[in-house]
Image (spheres, rainbow, N blue to C red):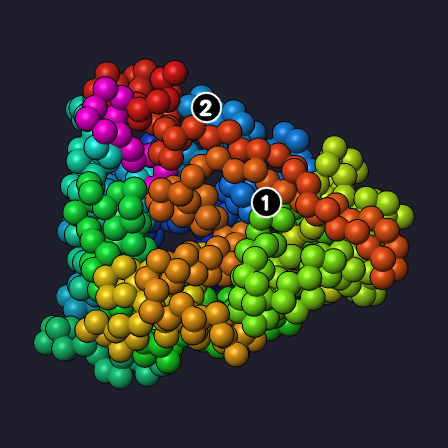
Amino acid sequence: MNILNHKIALMLAATAMVMTSCEDMFEPAPENLQDVAIMYQKPDFAYGMIGNSYRQLPYMSIWSRPQNSTDLACDDAYSNESDNAYIKMLTAWSKENDPTTKWVDSYNAIQYVNILLDNIDLIVWDTSSDALNQMYKDHFRGEALVHRALQFFYLLRTHAGPEEGGDGSVVGLPIHITQETGATDFNQSRPPLKDCVAQIMSDLNEAIDLLPYYFGNIRGNKWAPTSVPEKYLKMGAKEVDYNNANGDSHIGQACGQLALVIRAQVALWAASPAFAAYSGVTYEDAAKYAAAAVEKIGMLDGLPMDEWNWYSRYEEIHTMSNRENPSGVIWREGTVDSNNWEADNFPPSLYGKGRINPTQNLVDAFPMANGYPIDDPNSGYDEQNPYANRDPRLKEAILCNGDKAGVNDEVINTQIDSPTNDGMNVNRNEGSTTTGYYLKKHLYISAINLDPTTKTSMKHFYSRIRWTEIFLSYAEAANEVYGPDAKGPYSMSAYDIVKKIRTRCGIVDDAYLESIRGDQGKMRDLIRNERRLELCFENQRFYDIRRWNMPLQATLYGMEISGSGSSLNYKVVEVAKSNYEEYQRFGAIPYGETLKYSNLKQNAGWNK
């Protein structure tokens, strides 16, 4: 008898669980006062432990307010929402009020996962055969290890730093690899960062060994095996057993592919200038792990040509099944029928609140269509026609003055003298933009109607990880180790990746890229800028600035436009300033935690 069968449809077949935050998809876990031993004969209850980690995944969610984005806490965006927590961070980030913290959620998720891992050998996953029981055990152990690694990585990314009173070395956070009980000593000091990174890598390496590269029935998709793996064949496993344990019903859960990708993310972060001296990880390691991830999809040939504007292909998203991903998306949330993002971010004339306002800083980061930065004398940039002949990605991600939007292709007027509330207003009035720009990325800008009399909604999802990020990770690391145009032991160079990423969006005759092909420093700047453009509004730049040791303070600008017809005047104006201090390169340990535990030292600077 297969004990999982009676709940498998509820728990696993619905990707609303496996690809979303998993809310309401699992039986209540230990806080329900049920003894942990109940999981020994109830594998659905045991798997609920991982479900708690899915609920706490550290990604912006389609169910959360999309303006809760760290892009608002750096130089890429501002907001007309004066009480936005990330906007307040720009000038008043404190240890008592930290919207970036992952401490409670991620450590709670790790505790649930550890309960499962500590008891996994006692759980009867299946009574029909030893082989199937072992496949379930390997699957769920591997999946749990991926979750523990991911949650701990996001804790480190947010809270690792130099201790108050220390020697300036960046240290990690308490490592939890067993479940906590009443006898646990919680008053732990912080270990070296390299020990924390090593623990994450150990979890991911074991998960890679345990999990299939990708879930799916045998011969069911391009990554599924063509037969039962040898180690299970020797135990007498049949094809139907493999499909039960690792088949189609599990697509979207944490698999070997995801473990490889997260390992590449961790390695790049750990090898970055702010952490490399303390992490035990080098850029050579980061290149190796990124290459190992993309090798499975064919190296450079696997980088999709149509991924750069995946979020605008709403017809494809609206019709695809929950088990499908748009080209280039590795891991995503499940789809939900909604217009929340549009309601929050459409211009007022389209019945939106216009909350996320891209800055002029970000707009200026987009090059010209010929590839040259706008400040290069070869670019052809016209200050009196600033949106002409620009990188096509600009108009895909950002709504500029004169662009059309809405189901009726209405012209959006962001001028200070606009006849609508769409006009720029730095005083945050009636949903107007504070910068002269509105968000377009992630929104169905011409398909959703918010008119109260004819309101519509469509399927949305949030992409957690995309292949472009991992290729850019390789490019960043390879440039540092091998130089801009050398391939090292692999089949692609940093130059090759940047060229393909820019070519696919329409920058074909890329004279600028060719001109810096042999310059490591300029290629470094270009790779960082490409990452900024490709991953804007995906909660990356706030952390990239910090790991690259870039200046934290910045002036945020907008574009003030006046005039009429073809006689428009463009004036770059200051909108706000970030007031970060250098110690805020590293986030705070939650204040309440340092009060409870004397050995848990705060990061330097936060006790001012």
Is residue 349 at least partly visible in the picture? Answer: no
Which quarter of the figure has residue 135?
A: bottom left
| Residue name at image x 69 percent, y 51 percent | 438
Mark 2, other Cα within 10 Å: few <14 / some 14–19 / many ≥20 = some
Of all residues shown, which one is farthest toward the left? 234
Left or right position of 393 against 292: right
Query: Where 238 falls versus 422 (above or below)?
Result: below
Viewer-proximal residue among 210 and 398: 398
Q: Quadrant of the C terminus?
A: top left
| Residue name at image x 23 percent, y 29 percent | 168
SS state under label 2? loop
Q: Quadrant of the N terminus?
A: bottom left
Is residue 413 at least partly visible in the picture? Answer: yes
The residue that label 1 is drawn on is 77
SS state under label 1? strand
| Residue name at image x 27 percent, y 21 percent | 164
Mark 1, other Cα within 10 Å: few <14 / some 14–19 / many ≥20 = many
Query: Where 505 falls versus 119 (above or below)?
Result: below
Residue 460 falls within the magenta-colored stretch: no
Which quarter of the figure has residue 161?
A: top left
Which mark identifies residue 459?
none
Residue type (three-letter) at the residue carrying disc 2: Ser
The residue that label 2 is drawn on is 94
Which quarter of the figure has residue 113?
A: top left
Residue type (three-letter) at the residue carrying disc 1: Ala
Residue 164 falls within the magenta-colored stretch: yes
| Residue name at image x 54 percent, y 61 percent | 376
Between discs 1 and 2, the one toward the N terminus: 1
Q: Which residues are magenta?
A: 157-168
Tags 1 and 2 touching, CB below 8 Å: no
Which of label 1 and label 2 is nearer to you?
1
